[in-house]
Image (tube, grey):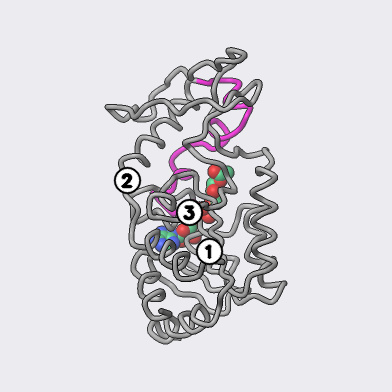
């Protein structure tokens, strides 16, 4: 199917759907300058070792290394701007109030584009909490200079003086229960699920589009590359989300 007919077909599906789920991954923020995890050359997990940065064991072994790396990412996100794909997602929500946005991203670009309450399946860079007692901690102020991935001692918890950790889900950790439940319920009840910029490799999050498809929803995928979600997608739009999603949303009205 050529690009134009794929956009037309996806737009027709969106036009006749009221209960829509938008499911996003790192690719939706790529054109805001935030690196993805698995893209060749630029992906974070191509350049950094996930086991020494994104596990509870890594934080226990070297809290300053892990905190510094996440503060570097937080400062990059703070300087980034939502791109036309985030804005198009917010437009879908504004036009179809039953829309649920589910994201695996730990940035806040959906919120800054106007999405009301995206479900954050993998937590947020802006919600740190105590590693020992779990009490939420205020995010540190904006860094004047990006810390550049340098080691940085984490702040201490005001309740128990344990080290404060980033509020993201690490490998080997469970997803936040309420977020996973909300995502599963929305996926099971939607008519259309748009999956945007995710490799579909990380479970249980990657189960969400499959769940929607099993419940009878149409799945539309936006991704420049093939993914394991291709078999469940009624339409796959191969290209960058910031170009394709605004076209799709305009065409659907
Ligand atoms: P990945 O890095 O695994 O996949 C990003 C996807 O975005 C790839 O399929 C790319 O082809 C696609 N992509 C790249 N540029 C794009 C663009 N401009 N428009 C649309 N798509 C584009 O990222 P995720 O699928 O989000 O987990 O990864 C899932 C989880 O793995 C993340 O949430 C993170 C990571 O480890 C945690 O932090 C817990």
Look at 60% across and 39% down and name the residue there. Answer: 169
- Which element type, helix, strand or loop, lies under badge 3? loop
Going from N to C along the chain, the mark reached first, 1 or 2, is 1
User: What range is drawn magenta here?
Assistant: 38-63
- Which SS class for mark 2? loop
Q: Is residue 249 magenta?
A: no
User: On the rendered image, what quadrant is the C terminus found in?
Assistant: bottom left
| First reached walking from the N terminus: tag 3 or tag 2 | 2
Front tag of 3 and 2: 3
CA neighbours of label 3 inside 10 A, class few (<14), some (14 to 19), many (20+): some
Q: Is residue 239 left or right of residue 63?
A: left
Residue 238 picture quarter:
bottom left
Q: Residue furthest left?
A: 144
Is 6 placed above or below 149 here? below
Assign a secondary structure to mark 1.
strand
- Return the mark for residue 116: 3
As displayed, is residue 218 above or below residue 229?
below
Q: Position of residue 155 (x, y in %)?
A: 48, 18
Which residue sits at x=39%, y=81%?
Answer: 251
How dense is the environment of label 2, judged by Cα within 10 Å: few (below 14), some, or many (20 and up)?
Answer: some
Left or right? Give the position of 153 relative to 76: right
Mark linked to residue 100: none
- Check the image and report above or below for 73 versus 118: above
The label shown at residue 22 is 1
Residue 31 in the image, given as x and y percentages of width and height: 34, 56
User: Label 2 belongs to which residue?
Assistant: 80
Please state if 239 lies on the left or on the right of 189 as rendered: left
Q: Where, by quadrant of the figure, is residue 230 drawn?
A: bottom right
Camera-side mark, 3 or 1: 3
């Amino acid at each position: 199917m050529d690009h134009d007919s794929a956009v037309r077909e996806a737009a027709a599906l969106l036009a006749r759907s009221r209960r829509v789920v938008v499911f996003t991954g790192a690719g939706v923020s790529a054109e805001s300058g935030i690196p993805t995890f698995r893209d060749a050359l630029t992906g974070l997990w191509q350049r950094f070792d996930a086991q020494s940065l994104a596990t509870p064991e890594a934080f226990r072994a070297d809290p300053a290394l892990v905190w510094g790396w996440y503060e570097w990412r937080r400062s990059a996100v703070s300087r980034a701007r939502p791109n036309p794909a985030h804005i198009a997602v917010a437009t879908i929500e504004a036009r179809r109030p039953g829309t649920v946005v589910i994201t695996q991203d730990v940035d806040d670009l959906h919120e800054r584009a106007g999405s009301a309450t995206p479900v954050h399946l993998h937590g947020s860079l802006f919600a740190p909490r105590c590693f020992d007692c779990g009490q939420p901690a205020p995010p540190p102020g904006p860094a004047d200079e990006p810390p550049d991935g340098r080691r940085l001692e984490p702040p201490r918890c005001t309740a128990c003086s344990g080290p404060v950790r980033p509020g993201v889900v690490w490998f080997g950790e469970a997803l936040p229960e309420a977020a996973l439940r909300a995502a599963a319920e929305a996926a099971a009840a939607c008519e259309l699920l748009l999956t945007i910029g995710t490799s579909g490799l990380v479970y249980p999050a990657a189960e969400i589009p499959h769940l929607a498809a099993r419940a009878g929803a149409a799945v539309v995928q936006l991704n420049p590359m093939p993914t394991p979600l291709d078999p469940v997608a009624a339409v796959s739009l191969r290209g960058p989300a910031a170009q394709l999603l605004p076209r799709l949303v305009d065409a659907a009205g």
